[in-house]
Image (cartoon, helix red, strand yellow):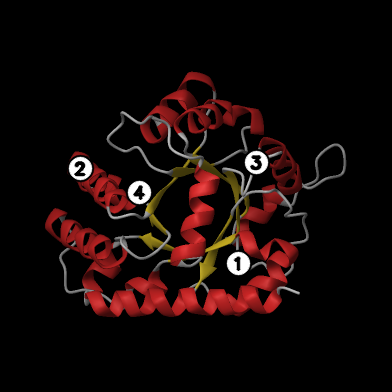
Amino acid sequence: MTPAPFGARLRHAMDTRGPLCVGIDPHASLLASWGLDDDIAGLERFTRTVVEALADRVAVLKPQSAFFERFGSRGVAVLEKAVEEARAAGALVLMDAKRGDIGSTMGAYAAAYLDKDSPLFSDAVTVSPYLGFGSLRPALDAAAASGAGVFVLALTSNPEGAEVQRATAADGRSLAQLMLDQLAAENAGATPLGSVGAVVGATLGDAGVNLAVNGPLLAPGIGAQGATPADLPAVFGDAVGNVVPSVSRGVLRHGPDVSGLREAAERFADEVRDAVSGSRP
């Protein structure tokens, strides 16, 4: 049976668990700060601890696939287990893979993350549209068929992104706005929230684009990158209620203590709730 659409499940998770996404980013320096070796054993311990601490209480967990892939097949096996266990505990899993290609290759990426029979099947995946929005069609169709979601890179938090994302299309729109308009069309008519989201950095100040896309807005940059929950209304304006702030190091640095991870995540979620409710009329 196909589950409810991702947008509906995400809206429910945000309303009941709080509007927060926590990244699972086991890079070498973070493993070391936990007293773990940069090897498979360290990766397994780190990942298991984060899932144990947070999967039953945060809305979204976002594993960064690169930090698992760097260990080869054994690292991917750890990722597969983490996805399974996090989803079983009630968290929505957003695979941060940022895949982007054309034709059958994009279809293969979609099969890896959006096919219910795949060991890496996730509730949503990040994708790059800068081979043309149409190149995402295999992923968009696969997500719709499985009740999953897709987050499209629009305005990212890295400074280099502006070279492409702020460039002007032939009709005068920025490329970021062009992508946002096309994903808004994918979400037309969806309630309570569409399943095609955008990635928009929380560090941007005034985003300078129309974010009324009827879909979720993943906002990286909270915590270690300098943005705070209080910054969200200025960046996202009237769309702030659909924002899913993403925090990684700001929470993960409180490990390996499970209670420390939980307290940090709860604190961020409370701060986001306050910022969002304070911005509403």
Q: Amino acid at mark 3?
A: Ala
The mark that comes first in sequence, 4 or 2, is 4
Q: Residue at x 52, y 35 (%)?
A: 100
Disc 3 and disc 2 in contact, CB within 8 angstroms: no
Residues at marks 2 and 1, CA–CA distance in whole angstroms: 32 Å
Residues at marks 4 and 2, CA–CA distance in whole angstroms: 13 Å
Local crowd size for mark 1, using a 10 Å CA cut-off: few (<14), some (14–19), many (≥20):
many
Please state the horizontal and vertical placement of residue 85, each as a whole percent of the image: 24, 50
Eyeballing the image, is 11 above or below 112? Answer: below
- Out of 176 and 91, give the one closest to the viewer: 91
Q: Residue at x 39, y 64 (%)?
A: 58
- Image quarter hosting the C terminus: bottom right
Viewer-nearest of labels 1 and 4? 1
Disc 2 and disc 1 in contact, CB within 8 angstroms: no
Number of callouts: 4
Disc 3 and disc 4 in contact, CB within 8 angstroms: no
